[in-house]
Amino acid sequence: MRASLVVAVLACAGCDRLFGLGTIPSPAPDGATSADRGAVHGQYLQLWAQNDAAGNAAEIQRPFPIDQITALATLDDGSTRTVTIADSGFSFTTPNAGDHYSLRFATPSQASTFDLAATELVLVERTTKRPDDPPAPPMTILAFDLSARHSENNAKEELVTTGTWSRHQVTTNVEVDCSAPDSTGAVIDMLSPHDGAFYTSTQAVGAYVRIMYAAQARDVATIAGAKATVPTLPIAPQMVNATSCANISIQGTAEGAREMLAAGGGTPVVGWYIGATPGLQEALSTEFPLANGFGAGQTNVMYGNPFGLRVEAVALSYATAPAGAASSVTSIAPVGDCTATTAIPAGQVALASNVRVAGTPIATTGTFVTVPATGNIEIAFDLSSDGTADYYVVHLDQIVGASTLTLEQIVTTAQRVHIPASRLLSTSTYRIRVDAALGFPHASLGDFLTMSETAAISVFQSPTFRPQ
């Protein structure tokens, strides 16, 4: 499973019970006048996948609860607009139709700003778990009771959950703390009826690896602050029936060279996998590898799917340069069978590079950047000559010891954004990340929900910098 791609957020605050809607008072709405001739309307959706009564994955979407969101619209001249929110959506006015605006939304899980000019918006916050479930307190343990394990042949053993989607590598005991994140940051939290748990053992088969053994427990529930053991009686993992076949070609050498060029050096690493995912909307964030390998692909890959989920072909490549920059690409495509080749070409999605903060290129670790005390500063970036993108997400990250705190997350269709100068402190260290997303064909029109069967995301991470 990969780190989630942020595609959107919505807005709202207090709710007028009499009329079923609320308004968000914005500070100093000096530009809001009855002369406004433009209007922006939109929906802010929550989207997630969960198991139905039969244990099958189902994608769910709903309007974001209006008592859990806040919003503020700011125009290019610095004036603000009140955002009106109802169950059916949100709206605000602009002086003229098509005016550029900065629309900031905050929810309990994230805050994002949208630098756009579209007038009809469909914004989405995707999550790997059910949004209404309570978080698991520490020491909420899920344990899998096996009568045998398969750790031979340097196997990688994992405990995988469905309904809330996570995968945790296990070693001594086949158990995990449901409050602890997995390698991608996903947290199991509380499991409930219809959720599932799997033990898997992934082992080498010639030039690639695949899930060789698996055991499943259905209708799994956890106990807050205590250990829950599943299933009710110990079970033995069974060999996975690897009857599916695929030929994978990812042109990894060419793609890896692109990452190395964008990062400014480093040795590219390329690989592929066939992954199971709850649905198309989760395919860029939630994947359970069924078979995987390094290099430019593999013919006659035999694999099984113990999860019973949708299957995608995935290509991965990344490079990290000595100067501190890094670049990566993740691409997905429907996987075929061995009567043809599932090909993921290089150069599909554009790569960001050469990030500038307040006009200063961030080329080496610890670059000093002169920033004003007040006002806004510009973050700009270049794009590779090959590949395209439907939109970008610019992240301002603060480095705190070994941790990273995202301070700003700005969705845009342009190659530059602005942040308040007050966000940068001379005592702190920062870096910029730029995600470029492909496979959202209507993003330029404000639709961040519609997604193509073939999609990709590139991520460029700048070296660190310090304001002065």
Image: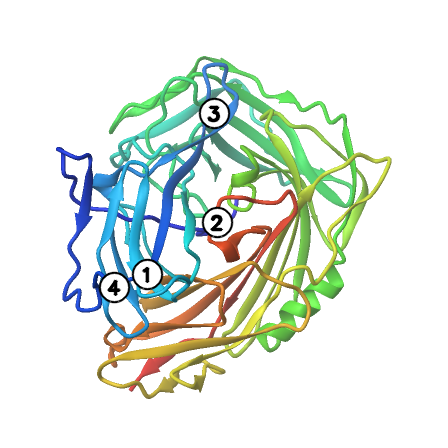
Mark 1–mark 2 Cα distance, whole angstroms, equals: 25 Å
Q: Residue at x 47, y 73 (%)?
A: 462
Q: Residue at x 29, y 87 (%)?
A: 468
Left or right side of 287 for 15: left
Q: Is 410 above or below relative to 106?
A: below
Residue 4 pos. (x, y %): 46, 49
Mark 3–mark 2 Cα distance, whole angstroms, equals: 32 Å
The label on residue 35 is 4
Residue 349 pos. (x, y %): 63, 60
Mark 2–mark 4 Cα distance, whole angstroms, equals: 30 Å
Q: Which badge, 3 or 2, comes first in the chain's sequence? A: 3
340 or 217: which is nearer to us?
A: 340
Q: Residues within 10 Å of mark 4 (few under 14, many from 20)?
A: few
Q: Nearer the viewer, mark 3 or mark 1?
A: 1
- Amino acid on which the number 2 mark rests in the picture: Phe
Quick one: SS at disc 3?
strand
Quick one: SS at disc 4?
loop
Quick one: SS at disc 2?
loop
168 or 467: which is nearer to us?
A: 467
Label 3 close to label 2 by CB (< 8 Å): no
Q: Which badge, 2 or 4, comes first in the chain's sequence? A: 4
Residue 395 pos. (x, y %): 40, 64
Which residue position holds label 2? 448
Mark 3–mark 4 Cα distance, whole angstroms, equals: 58 Å
Q: Is 354 above or below relative to 203?
A: below
- Amino acid on which the number 4 mark rests in the picture: Ala
294 or 259: which is nearer to us?
A: 259
Quick one: SS at disc 1?
loop
Which residue position holds label 3? 197
Which residue position holds label 1? 37
Label 1 close to label 4 by CB (< 8 Å): yes
Q: Which badge, 3 or 1, comes first in the chain's sequence? A: 1
